[in-house]
Image (cartoon, rainbow, N blue to C red):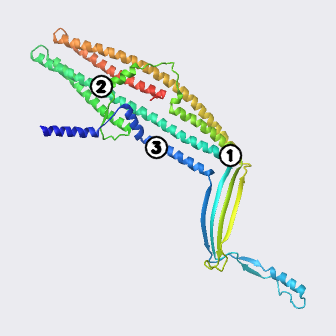
Amino acid sequence: MRTTLITILFLLSLQAKGQQAFSLEEAITFAVKESAETKLSDLDVRDAEAQITEYRSIGLPKVNAGVDFNRYFYTPVTPVEDFISPVIYEVLVDEFPNEVEAPPGPPQTFEFSFFTKNNLTAKIDGSMLLFDGSYLTGLKAAKLYKELTKKRRAVREEEIKSQVTKAYMNILIAEENAATLDKNIKTISSSLKEAKAYYENGFIEKLEVTRIELSLESLETEIEKVEQLIQLSHDLLKFQMSYPIDKPIKLTEDLETLVDSFSAEAVSLEQEIDFNKKAQYAEIEMGQELNELNIERLKKGYLPNLVARAGVSESLQRNKLFDSSEAGWLPTVYAGLALNIPITDGKLKKGQIQRAEIEKEKVAIQKAEFERGITMQVQTAKLQYINAKKTLANSKRILEVNEEIYETTQIKFREGVGSSIEVTQAENSLFQAQAEYINALYQLLITKTDLDIALGEL
C-alpha cells in the first residue's frame, strides 16, 4: 500500500513537471517571446541597425594599404628614333667642318625601355567625404527606418496577442460546455436510475426508461465531441503560442472571474479614440516621415559633393631585385580634393522627387482611411460588446428560470402529479437555455477581445 502511494505521488510529480500552467497574460508573453514572427521581426531590427552602420560608413574616413609586385620576363619597350645623333653631327660639322664627315644616312630607330624587370610598390591611400548634402538626410532616414521596423514588430505582436487571446477563450468556453454536459449527464443518470426503479415497480412504462436512456446517450455523444474540441483547441493554442504540441498545457484563468470583470466594465460610445495606441497607426506616421526625408535627400542631390584624398607610396624598381647597387626605394606622397558638381542628369532626380511626393500623398490618404476604419471598428465593437453584456444577463436569467422549471417538473413527476411529456419539454428547454447561455458567454469574451483589439489595448 505504501509502495503504491509513493509510486502515485512520484508519477504525479513527473506530470506536474512536464505540464506548464499559463494565465492569459503569461500565454501572451510566452507567445510574443517564442513566436517565429517575433524572432523574424527582431532580425529585421538588427538588419536595420546594420544598415545604419553601412550607410554611416559613407561619411567616415577610409584607408587602404597594399603591396604590388610585378616581374617582367619581357620588359615593355618603345621604338625611339635617334634624334640625338643628327644634332651632334650638325654641331661637330659646324665646329670642325674639315674633320667630321656628314652622317651616312637618315637617323636610326632603336628600342628603349622605361621599365625594370622587377617593380615592388608599397602604398597607403585614404579618402573622406567632406560634404554631401544628401548624406546626413539619408543617415536620418536610416535611423528612422530602424524605428519603423520596431513598429512593424509591434504590429505583429498585436496579431499574436489577438490570436492567443481568442484561442485561450475558446478553451475556457469549451471546458465550460463540457462541465455543463457533465452536470446534465449526472442528472440524467440519476433520473434513469429512478425511472428503472419505478418501471420495475410498475409505476411507469418501458417507453419512459427508453426515452431517458436515449437522452443520456445523446449527452454522452455530445460530451465526446466537446472533449475532442477541447483537445483541438489546446493544440491550436499551443500552435499560436509556439508551444510544443506534444507537451501538456494547463490554463489557470477562471472563466467566471473573467466574465464578472467584463460584465462590470462600463463602455461609453462617446469615448474619444486614441489612434496612437495602434501600432499600425504609428507605422503609417513613420512612413510619412520617411517619405519626407526621402524627398529632402533627393533635393539635396543637386548640391555638389567634396571628397579629400591622400596617399603615401614607395616603389623599388630594379632589374635585379636584391642588387643594392641599383636605385633604392622611391617615395611618393600626394594629397588632393575632388569636387563633383552635378550639372544635368536628364531629369532623373526630378522624376524621383515627383514619385516620392506621389507616394507621400498616397500615405496621407491611407492614414485618413485607417482613421475612418478604426473609428468604425471601435464603434461596432462597442455596440457588439454592450449587446453581448445584455444578452448574457438575459440568458443567465432564462437559464435560472428553466433550471427551476426542470426541478419542479421532476418533483411533480416523482410525486405522480406530472407527466413525462412535461419532463421532456422542461429538459429540452433547459438544454436549449444552457446552450444559449454558453453562446452568450462566448460572445461576451470575443466581443470584449475585439473591442480591446480595436482600441489598441490588448
Q: What residue type is labelled 3?
A: Leu
Residue at mark 3 to residue at mark 1: CA–CA distance: 34 Å
Q: Which tag is nearer the camera, tag 1 or tag 2?
A: 1
Q: Which tag is nearer the camera, tag 3 or tag 1?
A: 1
Residue labelled with disc 3: 40
Residue at mark 2 to residue at mark 3: CA–CA distance: 38 Å
The residue at 49%/35% (across/down) is 155
Q: In the rendered image of this protein, does residue 114 appear above or below residue 172?
A: below
Residue labelled with disc 1: 133
Taking depth in this image into account, of 424 and 412 the one nearest to the observer is 412
The residue at 60%/37% (across/down) is 289
Residue 432 horizontal/vertical position (percent): 30, 19
Contact, mark 3 vs mark 1 (Cβ under 8 Å) = no
- Specify the quadrant that holds the N terminus: top left
Q: Which amino acid does label 1 sit on?
A: Gly
Residue labelled with disc 2: 177
User: Label 1: how many residues lie within 10 Å, few (<14), some (14-19) or many (20+)?
Assistant: some
Q: What residue type is labelled 2?
A: Asn
- Specify the quadrant that holds the C terminus: top left
